Amino acid sequence: MFTVLERLYNHSWAANKVGNFNYIRARMKNNRAIASISCILDRGMGTIDETSYFEKKGHNDLVEEFCSYLEKHKPFIPDHLEITQSPNDRGTDLILQSDNCKLGFQIKSHYDVTEKEFAANVKRQCTESSAHGLNKWYLLICSPLKFRGRDLSKKIQSLLNEISSYKRDDVEVYSPRNAIKFFKDSLPLTEEEFANKLHVQIYCDVHVYFSAKYIEGCSKGELYELQIKVANNLRNKTINQYKLEFNFPDLSVLPIGYVQYNLQTAGNVLIRKENGFYQVIYNSRAPLLSGDNCDVGKEICFRYCCRPNLRGSDQLAITWNLHTDDGFSLKGDTNILNLWLSSQQITSQHTV
């Protein structure tokens, strides 16, 4: 019988067509385990007043409560929870270990924050934690932002800024307003909530790029070919099938402008004109391997003509949606004027 986490990963990574979970378990090392922890710790922010909960909490209490929070999410996290807490803990209070992935957590109470050498101690412990061979080190600052008339927010923010400047992917810090969500009135994520967060984590490196290639000048302005690429920057993840839908504005609404496209394109492309837009639906013809990209624009051969600096073109935009065969969706938009303003590839701002 699969655990909840196994079933969710089995669904999310089913496109690999491996047919047996042993392979998925073997590959579910760093990025899978870290993705699941990121989901569990993605609980939003509390208020400044809520952080007063930490005032009467000692270090041991905080470690036990956080361990309890993780235990509530046991179906979603790796097994074999090992707790280390001693004078020689080497910068790590709690260790989560499964297979070849090892994650460490260090918790700082209000007592730690009020110490003069708070920042120096944290940076030292960050270095010492490497002795555990961790794949990632998490720092939870569990302190009230205001304590006995003192404003601790600037001291904490200064440390957060310094650690952020290191640009280390193996270190993640949670401020008091984030950390409070793991302690005060913390309800566990439902399976549906976790699955949604996990999907976003898994597909965060799938991108859709739109740009324009100048073809030639013509009597009605300038002719461009729409450049579209779908990039799969996921590690060890093949996207078997996907569908890209986008709406391109009918440029005939401008004084000078028109759209032309190749009607002889393959049957995996549908183009129709409706409600002032050209609606384009592209169905992939081959799997998109990890680290690969598909030149969708070359297959569609969609061209348009306009004078980009013409008044009104800055109000027009391409809107698009990407759907994968295992239920993931990505959407975004790109302004028509932006296609002209840069000869380089324009990355659409996208939302999940």
Image (spheres, grey):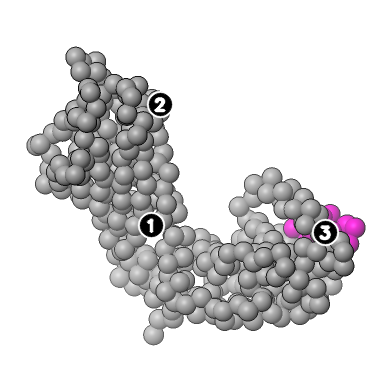
For image coordinates 10% across by 36% down, the residue present is 263
Residue 45 lies, in percent from the top left, at 62, 64
The kind of residue on which mark 2 rests is: Ser
> Which one is nearer the viewer's eye here, 62 or 84?
62
The kind of residue on which mark 3 rests is: Asp
Which circle marks residue 342 in the picture? 2
Under tag 1, what secondary structure?
Answer: loop
Under tag 3, what secondary structure?
Answer: strand
126 is within the stretch colored magenta: yes
> Closer to the observer: label 2 or label 1?
2
User: How far apart are the alpha carbons under marks 3 and 1?
Assistant: 46 Å
Viewed as shown, does residue 273 lie left or right of 27? left
149 is within the stretch colored magenta: no
Residues drawn in magenta? 115-127
Q: Residues within 10 Å of mark 3 (few under 14, many from 20)?
A: few
Label 3, on which residue? 151
